[in-house]
Image (tube, rainbow, N blue to C red):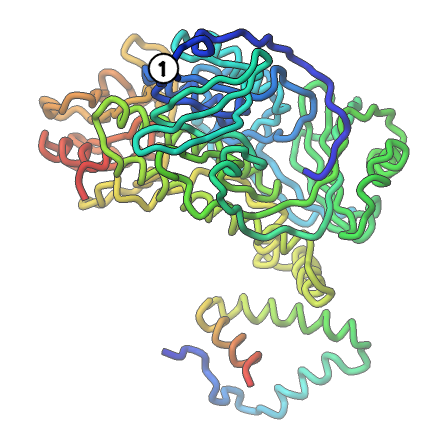
Amino acid sequence: MMASSPHKTLYHYGHARSADQDAAQPVRRPVVVVGAGPVGLAAAIDLALHDVPVVLIDDADRIGEGSRGICWSKRTLEICDRLGLGEGLVKQGVTWKLGKVFRGDDLVFSFDLLPEEGHKMPAFINLQQFYLEKALVDRAGELPNLDLRWKNKLTGLEPHNDHVRLTIDTPDGPYALDADWLIAADGARSTARDLLGLTFSGVTFEDKFLIADIKMAADYPTERRFWFEPTFHPGQSALMHRQPDNVWRIDLQLDPDADAAAEQEPERVRARIKRVVGDRPFELEWVSLYRFNCRRLDRFVHGRVVFVGDAAHQVSPFGARGANSGIQDAENLAWKLAAVLKGEAGPALIESYERERTQAADENIVHSTRSTDFIAPHTPAERALRNAVLDLAPKADFARRMINSGRLSVATVYDTALSTPDRDAFKGSARLGAPLPDAPVKTRDGHDGYLLDNIPGEFTLLYVKDGAPPKLPAGVRLATIGEDIVDKDGTLARRLDLTPGAALLLRPDQHLCARWRHVDAEKVASARDRAMGRTA
Amino acid sequence: MAKLITQSQFAEPDAAYVALVEARRNLREQAAAALDARLVLILANHIGDFDVLKEAIALAKGP
């Protein structure tokens, strides 16, 4: 972000002095998370739910206005649901799944991000980031082993072999704190990254984008609407999203040489918005001008410091791949770090975070870069080709498929050593290395629910009853399909391709790591060892 | 292994060439470029083979 209007404080939290500040020697904590944004909060909550005591520090003491992230993906909502706040978010947010793309004022293409029924969570909700942060802070407050310290600013970081020593500044002065592990969730301008002297390299795009949240009563549909060269903003692109509270996000592409200060003058912004919305009255809630980067750290794991979210990688906003991928980083790391701290797994499991989440970051950067190249062509010759695609779109399917106004965030299918390769053939939509697809089910007591509700944050063997279940190693939970979980309408059997005796092993992050047509104790034990990084 | 066919495939190569010529006859430079762009996209999709496309790009760009 280059500049933005001053933010109002929406939620204010007090600084409380920690007993750690009065200790004669630095106190040692298993995990410190720096940065109480969505990613740091999600990581801290997940760890606390895995019974790991967590200290979460943030240099501010408030959640400020300014919408920033607004689109929360299905996978993010599933993660939040496991953390205990998914249903509230869906209730509070605006659910959508349709995207429409216009050329000039004509519709050329539309897409449905979740064309099938039978999932608890929608394709996307739009919700102001501060509401998500508020819900996460509230959830954090319910967890006694999560110590959230506001106005704690990281100023020093000294790496050691088996811990890091942090220097933290507070309104009461500085103190030192030792952490077995530090999770750096301190955003695009990460202090932890600077303190370690790490380079953050990639591509900065020249085009500038004006982003405005406006309050307005309007009956536009609840869809993502994207325009190439609309008459209200000639020669450029525009994006519009609905948010709760009658707030609309409008994103307008500007010239690379646009004057940042002048473009944010309220009167100038108002004039631009008026061309978009016509005579409808509106109020400006928040305005910002940005130029974006696609870049990442070479490595996310540096000894005992692990980077997550924007501190580790940055993409353009088209595709909602920033905060969503950050929350997926947090989920990937939390169970692994918990297993390592409990002595159940070794460093190989943390290395799998590196492998899986750099794979996800690279995927996000590729998609984001491609979208940006389509939305903002670099040269007149590139623009001619882009416009040829748009010219052909009304006449040819292949051209509609090439239109790229942002490919929206979906969970990465991990190509990972933690998965046991399939030896039996499976159809359906479940993929090895991907989160399990959801399906409507009934629970043992006859209640309607969803599959993912029944897969908490621990290793789970889903077993289709056919005689006695296999003996399970400690730390693997059994869920028998037909008893604990009942297929409600055949969707479960179809999506997972279930037959009697079939079994699926799920990681604590609900990702599928092994499956068999017929299972025994040894297969499960060996797949679970593998998923804990214990074998090659 | 090369998949791009560079041997002549048209029964009447001259007629095929003239069809392309006539498509752009009397077009201004920008309109001709836009036509070429649309043609490239249509033909690339018809071929539908990413390796062939890359070989064709290399042949077109090469010395």
In the foreground, A9 or A316: A9
- Residue A125: give x, y in percent of width and height: 57, 27
Q: Is residue A466 above or below residue A289?
A: above
Which quarter shows the C terminus of chain A? top left
In the foreground, B57 or A328: A328
- Residue A419: give x, y in percent of width and height: 25, 40
Residue A426 visible (yes or no): yes
**Could you say which quadrant of the image residue B24 lies in?**
bottom right
Q: Is residue A421 above or below residue A507?
A: below
**Could you say which quadrant of the image residue A32 lies in?**
top left
The residue that disc 1 covers is A53
In the rendered structure, which amino acid carries the disc numbered 1? Answer: Pro
Task: Please give left or right for residue A441 compared with residue B32 in the image.
Answer: left
Residue displayed at 70% across by 85% down: B21
- Residue A460: give x, y in percent of width and height: 25, 24
Q: Residues within 10 Å of mark 1 (few under 14, many from 20)?
A: many
- Residue A248: give x, y in percent of width and height: 73, 28
Residue displayed at 10% across by 29% down: A521
Which quarter shows the N terminus of chain A? top right
Q: Mark 1 falls on what kind of element?
A: loop
